[in-house]
């Protein structure tokens, strides 16, 4: 919660897309963790959240030599499941965010939950960046670990570049069929508004990750300053309520804006419908006994 010069809060970015396109793996690659392999069946079944402090983003993007200053204190990234049965969680995630990453598997193109996610984003007018993931699966791909994508692309043979361009063109056409204009980010002069940017990535070897991070931060800083101003009004969304040994009932929340203190009185919506409240569930009035924040660069889901 360190306040930056311009007094901006951290943008919230939701990562969405069809099952197994590599959403969790992309976050693992940025965090240097291995959450995905610990998931049951390799399937994400709940919303995750990770805080990336500005220092880590600066370190990870330094090869791009962007002199643009980071004005945001960091980035909060929300991971969502891609499996078809979790539409509610995708909807919750997309409802929270300032910007989104829509992950597309370059070998598969647009798939049913890509389109479902796209429609959720369209509905809320949320801007997004397309991560065209798994470029390392292009036949003959030469690994350039964690390299900016233009640099990595220059190392590739003519055949790899040709296959990449063919698949990219197919994906751009598929987006057009959904009424969305997209373009490779370094060719996209408009950056958002009418044409959404595509960043080719590999979650396994890290190509394109610096580009993705820098674009996220630059774009939010440039176009969302008004929305990212710190305010005193608390804006907070509940993700989950659970009993944690040693802590009792805990609530996982995403604090979008404002500040919470221990001892603050809060009102949350209960689950039990009540006779006295004809508009639905009974309100629960309580106070915050303790505030626990996950470590930076660690998943909320991971016990530390
Ligand atoms: P759900 O959350 O279940 O929807 O899946 P997800 O989108 O989070 O995908 P996940 O990270 O679970 O990755 C799915 C599979 O694809 C795993 O076996 C990953 O190792 C693999 N994978 C993800 N990204 C890449 C990539 O960039 N390259 C390659 N070769 N494999 C990848
Ligand atoms: Mg996942
Ligand atoms: Na998966």
Image: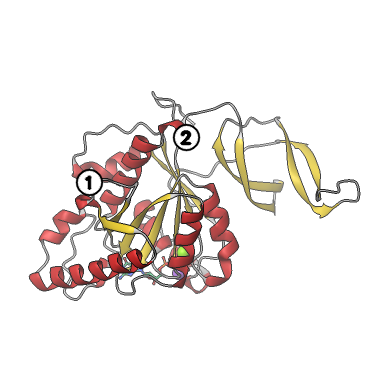
Where residue 140 appears, as percent x and y from the top left, is 16, 74
Q: Can the viewer see residue 84 in this picture? A: yes
Helix, strand or loop at label 1? It is: loop
Q: Quadrant of residue 59?
A: top left
Q: Looking at the picture, does residue 214 appear above or below residue 158? A: above
How packed mark 2 is, by other alpha carbons closer than 10 Å (few <14, some 14-19, many 20 or more), is some
Q: Residue furthest top?
A: 5
Look at 15% across and 60% down and name the residue there: 153
Q: Check disc 1 and report the residue beneath it.
A: 189
How packed mark 1 is, by other alpha carbons closer than 10 Å (few <14, some 14-19, many 20 or more), is few
Q: Earlier in the sequence, mark 2 or mark 1?
A: 1
Where residue 254 appears, as percent x and y from the top left, is 57, 44
Look at 54% across and 47% down and name the residue there: 96
Q: Check disc 2 and report the residue beneath it.
A: 227
Residue labelled 2 has its Cβ within 8 Å of some atom of ligand 2: no
Q: Looking at the picture, does residue 19 appear above or below residue 7? A: below
Look at 12% across and 66% down and name the residue there: 156
Return the residue nearer the eye: 178 or 40.
Answer: 178
Q: Residue furthest left?
A: 158
Q: Quadrant of residue 226?
A: top left
**In whole angstroms, how far apart are the C-alphas of marks 2 and 1?**
23 Å
Q: Can the viewer see residue 244 in this picture? A: no
Helix, strand or loop at label 2? It is: helix
Return the residue nearer the eye: 44 or 244.
Answer: 44
Query: Is residue 180 toward the left or the right of residue 37 in the image?
Result: left
Look at 34% across and 74% down and name the residue there: 108
């Amino acid at each position: 919660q360190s306040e930056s010069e311009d007094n901006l809060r951290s943008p919230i970015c939701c990562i969405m897309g069809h099952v197994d396109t590599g959403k969790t793996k992309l976050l693992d690659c940025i965090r240097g963790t291995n959450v995905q392999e610990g998931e049951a069946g390799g399937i994400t079944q709940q919303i995750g959240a990770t805080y990336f402090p500005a220092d880590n983003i600066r370190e990870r993007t330094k090869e791009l030599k962007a002199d643009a200053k980071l004005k945001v204190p960091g980035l909060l990234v929300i991971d969502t499941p891609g499996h078809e049965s979790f539409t509610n969680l995708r909807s919750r995630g997309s409802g929270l965010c300032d910007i989104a990453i829509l992950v597309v598997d370059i070998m598969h193109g647009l798939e049913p939950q890509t389109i479902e996610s796209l429609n959720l984003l369209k509905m809320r007018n949320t801007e997004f960046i397309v991560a065209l993931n798994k470029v390392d699966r292009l036949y003959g791909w030469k690994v350039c670990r964690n390299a900016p994508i233009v640099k990595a692309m220059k190392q590739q043979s003519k055949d790899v570049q040709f296959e990449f361009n063919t698949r990219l063109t197919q994906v751009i056409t598929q987006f057009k069929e959904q009424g969305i204009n997209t373009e490779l980010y370094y060719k996209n002069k408009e950056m958002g508004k009418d044409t959404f940017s595509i960043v080719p990535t590999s979650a396994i070897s890290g190509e394109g990750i610096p580009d993705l991070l820098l674009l996220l931060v630059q774009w939010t800083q440039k176009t969302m300053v008004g929305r990212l101003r710190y305010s005193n009004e608390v804006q907070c969304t509940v993700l989950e309520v659970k009993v944690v040994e040693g802590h009792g009932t805990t609530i996982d929340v995403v604090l979008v804006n404002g500040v919470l203190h221990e001892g603050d009185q809060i009102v949350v919506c209960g689950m039990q419908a009540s006779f006295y409240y004809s508009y639905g569930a009974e309100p629960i009035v309580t106070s915050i006994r303790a505030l626990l924040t996950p470590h930076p660069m660690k998943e909320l889901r991971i016990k530390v």
